[in-house]
Amino acid sequence: MTAPAGGSTRTAVWIVVPIAVVLSLLILLLATREPATERAINFELRGEIAPLIEGEGLDGVWFDIDDHSNQWVVVNFFSTTCVPCVREHPELVEFEARHAPLNDVVVVSVAFDDAAANIRAFFDDFGGDWPVISRDTGSIAVAYGVVAVPETYLVGPGGVIVEKLVGGVTADQLDGLILSAGGA
Amino acid sequence: MRPRVLSWLTLVVVSLSVLVFVAVDERSPATNADKAYALATEFACPVCQGQSVAESDVPVARTIRREIRVWVDEGRTDEFIRAQLVANFGEDIDYTPAASGVTSLVWILPVVVGAVALGGLAVVFRRWRDEPDRTANADDEAIVAAARRRR
Amino acid sequence: MSNSSLGAASVALGLAAAACAVVVVVMGLAGRRPGWFREARLLTWVMMFAATAAVVVMERALITRDFTVAFVAEHGSSQTPALFNVATLWSALEGSILLWTLVLCGYVVAVVLKFRTQGDDPMLAWALLTLFLVAGFFFALMVGPSAPFDRFAPPLGYDGPGPNPLLQNHILMAFHPPILYLGYVGFTVPFAFAIGALCTGRVGEGWLLATRRWTVMAWGYLTLGIVLGAWWSYETLGWGGYWAWDPVENASFLPWLTGTAFIHSVMVQERRGMLRVWNLSLVISTFALTILGTFITRSGVLQSVHAFVESGIGPWLLTFLAVIVIVSLGLIGWRGDELRAPGKIDSPVSREGAFLANNVLFAAFAFVVLLGTIFPLIVEAIDGRTISVGNPYFERMTMPIGFVLLFLMAIAPVLPWRKTTGEVLSDRLHWPAWIGAGSMVAAALLGARGWSPTLAFGLGGFAGGSALRQVVLATRRQGWRGLVGRTNGGMVVHLGVVLIAIAFAASNAYVRQGEFTMAVGDTAQISGHTLTYEGSRLTEYSNRTEKSARVLVDEAKVYEPAIAQYPFAGRTIGIPSVRSTWTDDIALSVLTFPEGSGDTVVLRATVQPLIVWLWIGGLVMAAGSVLAVVPGKRRRPTAPTSAPPTSHEVLL
């Protein structure tokens, strides 16, 4: 801030130079920033123990992720109105069919901000035979830090989160991840 | 002059007692809904541009609002809720910059700059006070007199 | 000729005219062209013609839906209602720059007309040079990175998406951006004269007196623009808020803060000849901050609800900003010794002391807002973390400043210049202070609780009382003339500020919000109001489909908040329903109509007190600015401006 009283030429320089330095730094800072929309999404949970998922499935069977600590768990957050969710669904069906005989992987779908009736219709239409938790899923979504569906979390044996996939998955992608993480 | 002093005294007493009264007397304690709403305004909606969790209508904001409400109903502290959300969604969900590390600068800098400005003003005023008053000399008086005659 | 070629030709003409004008002025300054002013004046008219032609062509293209113009193809639509079709111009970057340029050319024409008799004044020459350079920059933007008249080959039956739905569903969108621009761009004029003063070394009061009306006018437009923007947010965004300390909002607020500091501190310089460097810095920062604000709005480096457009003009604006900063600081450094102020301030408790305090506070306010806005970028640059700075920070940091400013607003208008006595103060502040105390008592009786809003009411009443005292005294003395002129108009502005401060404190402290999931016939309670859901209905419009919820409030008023789907823009937005009364507002918005569960709705209701006074306060401030620009009582040129106060002055 400039001293209100002004001063001799020397004082003026003494005041102007630091301001110039600060402002140059500011402009440099603004010049070197990426646009906000291109910054990476947060992923805070890699390597952490997967937050608890438990609840009643569509079929009435109780699901608890802790019962599957010796398997890989694919946690899929989705909603029936989201287009990429509809698009990725056949891939999940395919992936589940590959692993059903081996019993090394379990897929669990968690509805995100959607009504149970819609979910039931969705699975009737598009197939898929695995636990689907549709009620009171807000806490689960918040615990995983889900921001926009579809989001898929790959949980390794032992319950540690290995990877987070955003915007749709494919069966091969999931298999590849499991393979590279040294599993199955 | 007496009545005016009395009036000012009354004014100070009235104002202070009103302030104390409104600060102490909580007529309706905040409900859980109010507490949850107030908290929701303190967090950024993770996918929106520049809207808080309280403001946005996207699913994730609604979900977080509901979860905050659940936590408030469970009687969790604000610190717990803040820590949970930061752990799950990242540091940038919190609209309040931490008062430690680099981010503490945002709190400290304005105070430092303000103190420097006030200090500068104090120095300047002191210098002004010590400076002798300029008095008009004969030439100045002549200029003024000439100007007045022209008017 | 097609609209594209006509428009592009106009822009090119404008750039050429600006370039010629720069050359003419430079030659004039070098003494090689005695008739330079006449030529510059002609070129100004050419620029004005070019900018007007470009805007007219663009509006014609928008109205006739000429999709061969890329801008129309990208932002226009045959489905957009007529009014918003015109407003589409400023709904996107290229059109905004076009509007900006037109406004700037208008200001340059006004300057040339106003100063037509002073064509041989080098200060005017330097000021015009600055104005032409700025105008040239904006024409160059339109030739380069932000070309509005690019061509597009529309396939058969092509229709555009229309402007962002949020920008075409409220009438305020037709007024808020142009008025904001009148404010933003208006600060170019005092800036140009400040540069002129620095270049000629005539850093006395001349440039201030020449531009003070321009500054007040620009400030008034900026104020009105910001208030209209807040009003628009409140009416359309559906979260019951009007100010969220969002980067783009802050960007418009920053020049307002420094501009406000400036219009106060100029009075010290006019009266006492002091604060020269400070005033120059303020007016230069105000202009620089308008450019920084445009950069923040347009570059997308900061997240914002208002950042509707991202584009490649960021580097251009930043370079321009750097040039402004370097040139201005260089000039101030160079002229340092001549800027030395002759006078001194005798006592901190005096009018000039109060103006000084006002300036320190506004500068601190601006610093806090700027720091908070760009701080996430600083942290990211230092250690790569992404953080946010929002509401809680700004509220905590600016609230104390706001309180002190209100207090200052209460005592400063009654302070005499130079020095004062306790007796004078006690005399003049007596009944304003009682108005303040009375407001607190009244607020407490009406149910206000919590110390900070109550203190805001008290200080607001105090400040309002003292502004009222000045207005009453002035009108008693001078009749209707007691309302016009800078001092008296300024007091009217103060009354508007008080209204806004009180409404802001009340709505912030006593807002109630609730979310309700309701089936038909359900009722809900919020803040003493009853909401009854009566069902939904679907309405088709030319450009959207609306699903609205019929909600009966207090068994009397029907609200119809809705969700609108814009198929062309591929977006869904909420359309809140807001009703104001003098005491409180109810705002309803539909969050969703959940599928598969019958006719239910998830509603959000926000109840806030005194909202309407924010807009009234804004209008009062704008009206006060108009009154301040009307010439008041003329001071004789020989009237003393920095002599010791006469007994007459002390008594007033």
Image (spheres, coloured by chain):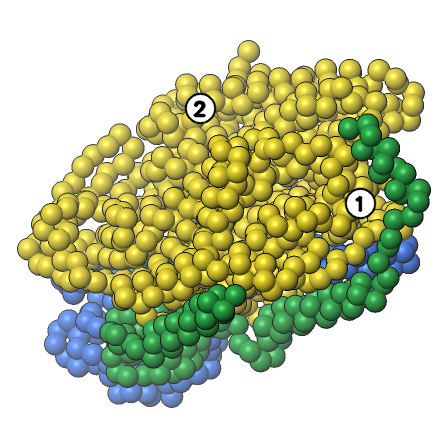
Chain colours: A blue, B green, C yellow
Residue B127 horizontal side relative to residue C247, left or right: right
Q: Is residue C191 left or right of residue C582?
A: right
Q: Position of residue A63 (x, y in %)?
A: 21, 81
Numbered disc in front, either 1 or 2: 1
Horizontal and vertical percent position of residue C344: 79, 56
Of all residues, the one furthest to the front in this rendering is B2
Q: Give the crowd class for mark 2: few <14, some 14-19, many >=20 residues within 10 Å.
A: many
Could you tell me the amino acid type at mark 2? Leu
**Residue picked out by circle 1:** C327
Location of mark 2 (residue) = C62
In this rendering, would C214 be left or right of B96?
right
Q: Residues within 10 Å of mark 1 (few under 14, many from 20)?
A: few
**Residue C618: horizontal and vertical position, in percent?**
44, 44
For label 1, the SS is helix
The answer to whether residue C220 is left or right of residue C290 is left
Q: Quadrant of the N terminus of chain C?
A: top right
User: Can residue C303 be seen from the camera position used here?
Assistant: no
